[in-house]
Structures are given as C-alpha cells and as structure tokens.
Amino acid sequence: MIIGKAQYEEYISNFTDKKVFFSINEGENYIKNTNASSVVLSLKLCNLYGALNTLKQKKLNSYLKDFYSKSLPIISNKYGGKVDQISAQYIVAVFSDNFKFRNTTYSDILKDAYSCAKELMSTLKANRYSVSISIAMGDLCFCQVSNTEVLFDEVVCMGEPMLLANELINMSTVNEILIPENISHMVYADKELRASWSIASQTCDFPGIGNCYIKKLIKL
C-alpha cells in the first residue's frame, strides 16, 4: 500500500536517519488513474537473519538504519519511485507515470527502475550488504481506500507485476537482479554491464502466472 509521508516516517522512525526524506504525498493528491502501466521493484536484504544471530539489539538497529538510509533516498529521491512496502528485510517500490509529479514516458520510467536496481545493488554491495532485487512491469490497479475503513488514506497497488516481482525475489539469491522477458531488452542495450556484471538466463513456471523467461544480472 502506498501511504502518506507522515505514516511512513512514523513507521520507520526508529530505523532511518533524519536526513532521509520520502517523496511521498497523500494518495488522493498524486494518483491520476485507477489503472496504469507501472514497474515494481522488490529489494531483499539477504543476510538479515545472520545479523539477528550475531548483532546485539543496539547494533542491529544501527545495521537496519544504515540499510534503509542508503536504499530509500536512491529509490524515492533520485529515481522517483514510490515506496509501497517496508517489511524487515524487504522494500517494495512502484515506478509509474500514474503519479502526478511525473511528466515522463513509460520508457523513461522503465529506465529509472532499471537504473535504480543497478545502483541499489552496487551501493549496498559496496557497503557489505548482501541483497537481491527483482523488477517486473505491466498494468497495476491503484485503489484508493477510504479513511472510513482505515486509520489513514492508502493507495493499494494490485496486479501481475506485483505478483511476479514477489515470485522473483523469493527465488533470487545474493547479488542477483532478476528481470523478466518483457524487460530483457534493457539488458541487451546496456553497454556498461560487461565490466562488472555476469549475465545468465533461466526459465521458471510460476502458479497463476505461467512460464517466465528471466535474465539474471549477477554483480561481480
């Protein structure tokens, strides 16, 4: 669910530095349509359970604070993604021309999400965080939830890209970015990959989605 800035700041106030600012407004102010072509990015912190076993509470808080503080500005401030979910080691973000503050083409949004995934991987790996990432694109349904039903306004995103990004992140391993076939042209067009990335392919069969040909970008 994409919710307002105040709610997210309250939700993760114990884990993020004050310097982190979310580019999130109240839902009814920035959603243009109920359906829109979008890109979903899912980020997983792979070694969280190892950290739980080795770090004391104070150091664990610092560990998560640093992870969020490095990840969220890249997603929200640099590439214009909206944070949809933060849950322990997972961050899910949506990139869409459905947000009123964006005046870009769908191609631009896909490039933003792809570039965001690569920068997240490079930045977090350089800071000794073991992560994996998935991205998926397609139509999302944006549902405004009335505040008569919940404590605050929410925008809930539903659709196949959300399901596929979730399936891909669950099968991913450390240092991987998983990309489905309908985005694979981004990989072929990327001339900067060869120096520091390995590229592999795989076919998967997901319940409710079917066969999916994916590209694996593995950060060296």
Image (cartoon, rainbow, N blue to C red):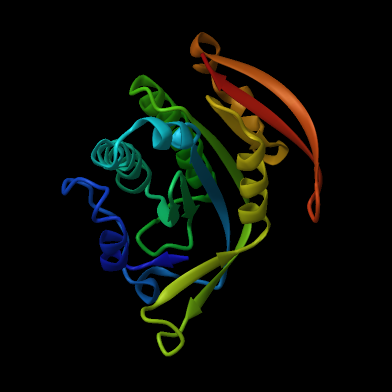
Image-quadrant location for residue 74: top left
- Asked if residue 144 is positioned above or below residue 83 in the image, the reply reads below
Q: Nearer the viewer, residue 11 or 92?
A: 11
Q: Please state the total of marks drawn on the protein image.
A: 0
Q: Does residue 138 show up?
A: no
Q: Position of residue 69 (x, y in %)?
A: 27, 41
- Asked if residue 157 is positioned above or below residue 211 in the image, the reply reads below
Image-quadrant location for residue 73: top left
Q: Position of residue 11 (x, y in %)?
A: 31, 61
In the picture provided, is 3 more to the left or to the right than 73?
Answer: right
Q: Residue pushed farthest left?
A: 18
Q: Position of residue 142 (x, y in %)?
A: 54, 69
Q: Residue pushed farthest bottom?
A: 148
Q: Residue at x 64, y 53 (%)?
A: 161
In the picture provided, is 152 more to the left or to the right than 188?
Answer: left
Q: Residue at x 55, y 49 (%)?
A: 39
Q: Does residue 24 show up?
A: yes
- Asked if residue 51 is positioned above or below residue 94 in the image, the reply reads above
Q: Residue at x 46, y 87 (%)?
A: 149
Q: Residue at x 37, y 81 (%)?
A: 151
Image-quadrant location for residue 28: bottom left
Q: Position of residue 166 (x, y in %)?
A: 62, 48
Q: Nearer the viewer, residue 78 or 12?
A: 12
In the picture provided, is 36 more to the left or to the right than 20?
Answer: right
